[in-house]
Amino acid sequence: MKAKYLFILIILIIFHASPAFSEPRTAIKYKWRIGTLAPQGVGYAIAVQEILLPELYEATRQELGIKIYWGGILGDDRNHIKQMEIGKLHGAGLSGQGSFLACPEVGVIALPFLFTGFEEVDYLKTKMITSFDAQFEKRGMKILFWVDQDFDQTYSTGKMIQKAEDFKGLRFVNWCGDLEKNVLERLGCEIVPEENVGNIPGMFKSGAIDAGVAPAIWMVGAQLYTVVRHVNPLRFRYTPAFIVARKSAFEKLPEEYRKNIENTRLKTAQRFCDRTRSETGRCLKAMFDYGVTEAKSSDEAVAEIRRVITPVWYEMAGKLYPPELLDEVLDYMAAYRSEKGVAEASAPAPAAAERAPAPVVAPAAAPAGGEGLMSDVNAIRFVQGRLRELGYYPYLVDGILGPITYRGIKKYQKDKGLPETGTVTPELVKSLGGR
């Protein structure tokens, strides 16, 4: 009965009747072929046809014709990228995994707990789309639209995942590259790598894996609601999706058309995201209605998970993305949260009169190399407290090394002539009066 109920919900939510695809009827001067994993007829595909394609046609005065190969009929994202490189495809609608394969640097916006909600995502899009344009262009691609995969949730077939320790020993599928792998390793998971997303449903069903991080709409579409027992709806990470064109194909368009696309793409993508975000939310609710258990985490448990995995932000700088790109992202996030009065853990910052003085307690001696300081709650609290006394950090002493703390540390390090890492180092602790 439950399965029947959820099937009806899925039909209503996602698998609408798809309008027939057609190109503009005027004279077409530029013809593009685009591949994507999105199946024709699902909510994402319909939003592409009803929102994104008409805007591209209008921006190009109906002279651009686009043929979309839906549902991975030309292969997965790896194949789409390769076919773009050799000129067989003019563009691709990339999933999160495909986006990271095409341009590893965009992994910086999939850092765990970087964002507290879509409001911050949308703010960052307005500030950084040109920066990511530059990264994609290095690889011969041009961003047409920056949309969303989702805020991905954590799913498990056995043990409920609520605290950092609950991750330990679970067999987690790893399909989103090195960043995801490093995060799961920090949590003590057993990593089960899989590059082909099409194999993951079978891995869940056969018991080859115990858990995974994925978007709700994909879990419903893959019918994995019948297999997983628990979902923690905590916004573990934001995963982007990009619709890109081959740079050479984009540059063949007249300058007027290129400017039209660039000037309207953020607004158009926002309309697309407003629709698809509501659908992914309903997919999560449908799973709860079916009987999948919600694994709720306390504020303390969330803070601990954050402290364990946040060091990955800085460890991957210089490996996956340039340190300068991380600086840019965190500076924008710090500016946004300072303006909105939001602390690192997304709790509203108290008024100045309500802020109790932070105790100046020196942390325990740092481990060799000082690497453990980035996740040492006492060390971070000490640094936050001292920086607040000195006017470098205006918010809560919460032991979380987030964007505002990062910016405060870097400013202090610059003023004192210390290496500008933005992280808690032995030199920083010593300079602040610790040991």
Image (cartoon, rainbow, N blue to C red):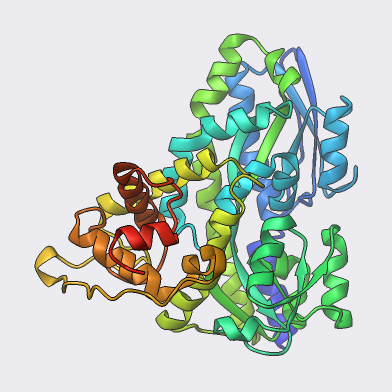
User: Residue visible at 46% across and 73% down?
Assistant: 376
Query: Looking at the image, which residue is at 71% across and 15% down?
Result: 26
Q: Position of residue 55 (x, y in %)?
A: 58, 29
Residue nearest the viewer, comparing 187 with 36: 187
Picture quarter with the N terminus: bottom right
The foreground one among 377 and 345 is: 377
Q: Which quarter of the figure has residue 152?
A: bottom right
Q: Is residue 400 left or right of residue 270?
A: left
Tell whether 389 sits left or right of 264.
left
**Which one is in front, 177 or 378?**
378
Reply above or below: 33 against 300.
above
Q: Position of residue 110 (x, y in %)?
A: 59, 54
Q: Is residue 345 left or right of residue 15?
A: left
Q: How many marks?
A: 0
Residue 145 in percent (x, y) is at 60, 36
- The image shows residue 131, relative to residue 44, as above or below, that is above
Assign the C terminus to one quadrant of the image: bottom left
Residue 132 seen in the current view? yes
Q: Which residue is drawn at the image coordinates 46% and 49% (left, top)? A: 421
Residue most toward the left? Answer: 353
Residue 116 in sight in this render: no
Q: Which residue is painted at 71% across and 63% down in the image?
A: 181
Residue 39 spot, x, y in % from top left: 79, 52
**On the rendered structure, is 390 left or right of 431?**
left
| Residue 160 higher or lower than 91, as above or below | below
